[in-house]
Image (cartoon, rainbow, N blue to C red):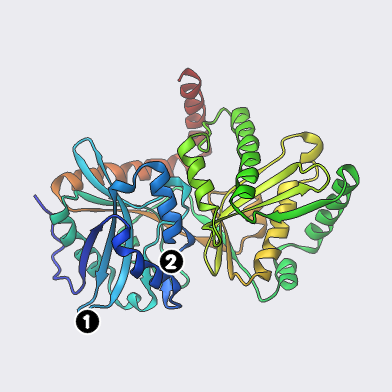
Amino acid sequence: MRITSGLRPTLTATILPGLDAAEGLWRSAEASADSLFTPYQRIDWIAAYLRETGEADDARVAILCDQAGRMRLLLPLVVRRRRGLTLACTVGDTHANFHLPVFSRDAAAVPSAEVRAALLSAAASAGIDAFSFAHQPEIWEGTPNPLALGGEAAASNAYGLVLGPDPESTIKRVFSADARKKLRSKEKRLTDALGPIAYRRAGDGEEARAFLSAFYLQKAARFAGMGIRDPYAPEAVRRFLERAASGADPAVEIHVLQVVETGRILAVFGGAVNATRYSGMMTSFEADPEIARFSPGDLLLHHLVKEQTGRGRLAFDLGIGEARYKASICDETITLVETVWPVTIRGHAFALVRTGLIRLKRQVKGDPRLFAAASRIRSILRRRA
């Protein structure tokens, strides 16, 4: 049985199989100054993820047009079948901090309820039981996100900062005078200890792979020390990052702090990019205490904020979750929700269960005692596995 929204849609939704049929429209939308989307919705980022994780055959693209035939929203999806349910999910899982659609700025004039009504209508004929939208910003660049309607508050928010108007003024605003002085001292002492250092951005796929190899090693060591499963260990994930970081206009940029003479990589920072934003996906640094005391990760982040401003990007975000380095420099909290829109009775049952799990996760994360207990249980289960 299908659940209806009770509204007569003023938008028409079409769900296309695969990415190819939507590519021209998608790239045109990316190039338009009127479009809103995050770096995780670039077609090159989405395509790399789907192809390397083996989900390309399950990809769908929902296109919503108004009565005049103008596209108002484009939404990449992957259809997953779980325990008798067919779910239409956003693409990228936890490797994407934001799962926004690509939509025009004037789409804000279209009520979110009409977006939902159009998607529910199209989903019925596509055999979809529910839409599951994780990591949904409530507001993006001052515009309400239509997919956030009815969303449940996520356990953690994301954090970012505004760049500009020029590198020097941005650095002075983001980093206090005391912080800048300490970083200059650490950089000097690091140079005295190891020789000249360089801040580098991967210039091609080969260099990106070399930088990522250092990241994998550094991250694996850190996760092993914490007793946490390494999400970058699967070969599919590594192939995705390497594909996304390749090409003349990569969807992912990899930056490193490197010793000039030996080539030793002391810290790595990777992020998804579009014309206006750098979205941090991952960071690592050398675990050796003799190196860590110079804060190579902080040095690289300081340089990266300056470098991105100089290249004309307007925003820099550091992803989901609380951390000391985020609190020290970020001036924006990006409130996130998770949305489930049921299409059928089975989808409605899934929505109830999923909403309960989201609330439980938020409660556990908000209570230090519950969070510590949950962490201990996860650690025990991983060791037994």
The answer to whether 8 appears left or right of 140 in the picture is: left
Residue drawn at x 19%, y 65% as measured from the top left: 117
Residue drawn at x 49%, y 54% as measured from the top left: 157
Q: How many marks?
A: 2
| Residue 31 in which image quadrant | bottom left
The answer to whether 227 appears left or right of 211 in the picture is: left
- Residue 75 or residue 207, whichever sits in front: 207
| Residue 362 in which image quadrant | top left
- Residue 288 or residue 204, whichever sits in front: 204
> What residue did someone put label 2 on?
37
Q: CA distance from mark 1 to mark 2?
A: 23 Å
Residue drawn at x 19%, y 47% as measured from the top left: 347
- Say if 38 sits above or below 218 in the image: below
Look at label 1 and name its amino acid. Answer: Ala
- Residue 259 or residue 94, whichever sits in front: 259
Q: Secondary structure at mark 2?
A: loop
Q: Residue furthest right?
A: 192
Q: Give the x, y percent position of residue 312.
A: 62, 72
> What residue did someone put label 1 on?
68
Look at label 2 and name its amino acid. Answer: Phe
